[in-house]
Amino acid sequence: MKTPFIAIAFFLLVAPAFARIGETEQQIENRYGKSTLTVSTGNEPLQKVYQSSGLNITVTYLDGVSQREIFTKQDGSELSKNEIAILLEANTAGSKWIEDPTATSLAGMQGWKLESGGRTAAFSRDKTRLVITTDLVQKVFNQRKAEDEKEKLKGF
């Protein structure tokens, strides 16, 4: 009888550390309000856009759980260093972000990864977009892209 209680207590203590990335679609909606747009196409995971606090937040879901969030200002202006720090802090998963130029695939972008692994973040060169993503969603995107390419070239 103690085991389920301990597991529930542990989850309740750890759950707040997993803010935003890792939240369900309902939790995201409670945080940001109703989505303004669904942008998924083809074989891509579900992607919805929300607007909150002057930001557009594009959330990618896998199995109903947020796995990637892209933050841009609604007016198109640059994100400040303070705003970036706040958004990164909200998505630490109880770990610490460390700067990592290899965390991004585009040269010149600032990148981070969690010390504990599993998430990366990248800040665009034009300083208008911060992308926080899990390793899982990137694997799914790559797999689905490969499946689409295979289907497209079937018969060659």
Image (spheres, rainbow, N blue to C red):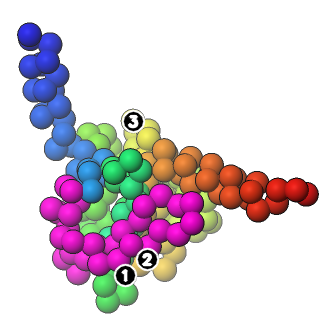
* CA distance separating discs 1 and 3: 29 Å
For label 3, the SS is loop
Q: Quadrant of the N terminus?
A: top left
Q: Which residue is mark 3?
A: 116
Q: Range of the magenta residues?
A: 26-54
Circles 1 and 2 in contact, beta carbons < 8 Å: yes
Q: Counting residues from the N terminus, which is met first, the one under dot 1 or under dot 2?
A: 1
Q: Residue 116: percent from the left, percent from the top?
A: 39, 36
Tell me if 19 is positioned left or right of 136 in this view: left
Disc on res. 127: 2
Disc on res. 78: 1
What's under tag 2, amino acid-wise?
Lys
What's under tag 1, amino acid-wise?
Glu
- Up-down relation of residue 6 to residue 124 (above or below): above
Task: Report the front residue among 33 and 19.
Answer: 33
Task: Report the front residue among 74 and 2.
Answer: 2
- Up-down relation of residue 125 to residue 42 (above or below): below
Q: Residues within 10 Å of mark 1 (few under 14, many from 20)?
A: some
Residue for point 19% across, 40% down: 15
Q: Counting residues from the N terminus, which is met first, the one under dot 2 or under dot 3?
A: 3
Disc on res. 122: none
Q: Is residue 9 visible?
A: yes
Q: Counting residues from the N terminus, which is met first, the one under dot 1 or under dot 3?
A: 1
Residue for point 38% across, 47% down: 63
Q: Is residue 81 visible?
A: no
What's under tag 3, amino acid-wise?
Ser
Q: Residue 98: percent from the left, percent from the top?
A: 41, 47
For label 1, the SS is loop
Q: Residues within 10 Å of mark 3 (few under 14, many from 20)?
A: few
Task: Report the front residue among 70 and 2.
Answer: 2
Q: Quadrant of the C terminus?
A: bottom right
